[in-house]
Image (cartoon, grey):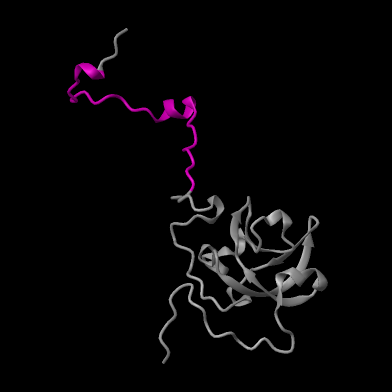
Amino acid sequence: MAAPLAFGARKKEPPIGAESCVPFTEANRHLGKQMCIRGTVMTIRDAEDATYLNLCADYRKCPLSVVIFDDDANRVGDVRALAGKEITVRGKVEEYDGRLEMVLSERSQLYGIELPPIPREYDVTSKGHASAGRFSRPHHVSSASTKSKRTAPDPTATLTPDDVEDH
């Protein structure tokens, strides 16, 4: 049995089949097609509902970005481990808002690198700011229902000066 790989370690490349992986700079020739691209993750950018793996130092000048939507993040893994690493991704080259992108929605689309799972305390929707959940205030009880639930004071209770209101 082979020793397990450390997170971020490279695995043996699986056979790609008849199609070969192309550099991300050639993705524009394959718009609308399922294909395999490769490149080095230069930066990782968090947006409102997605994380972008940018294969160029300046994402605005890059011909293609790899997109992981927040809803898919748990199926992909902790992509922060990809910073500075060469990646090979299979998916469909799509155009969105005048830019090319490839959506990474499952771990199986990413070859050559084993990603760690997203830590439990990492809140994808707040991009790393831990969240214990959502707090909702108790519903306000109207004064009418409060009056009907009031009980008479306990005549045997001992009062302290703090219990008595000054009028």
Report which quarter residue 42 is drawn in: bottom right
Q: Is residue 32 visible?
A: no
Compared to residue 147, the image places residue 38 above or below, namely below
Q: Is residue 90 visible?
A: yes
Quarter of the picture holding the C terminus:
top left
Query: Which residue is located at x 49 percent, y 32 percent?
Result: 140
Quarter of the picture holding the N terminus:
bottom left
Compared to residue 50, the image places residue 78 above or below, namely below
Query: Which residue is located at x 21 percent, y 23 percent?
Result: 155
Q: Is residue 144 left or right of residue 100?
A: left
Report which quarter residue 52 is drawn in: bottom right
Compared to residue 158, the image places residue 3 above or below, namely below
Give whichever of 34, 56 is nearer the camera.
56
Report which quarter residue 154 is drawn in: top left
Main secondary structure found in the magenta portion = loop
Residue 25, given in percent of the width and then of the height, sits at: 74, 69
Q: Residue furthest front?
A: 57
Give whichever of 157, 102 is nearer the camera.
102
Is residue 49 a member of the stretch shown in magenta? Answer: no
Q: Is residue 127 left or right of residue 165?
A: right
Residue 11, given in percent of the width and then of the height, sits at: 52, 82
Magenta residues, as a range?
134-163
Residue 31, given in percent of the width and then of the height, sits at: 81, 70
Q: Residue furthest bottom?
A: 1
Is residue 154 a member of the stretch shown in magenta? Answer: yes
Compared to residue 6, the image places residue 137 above or below, namely above
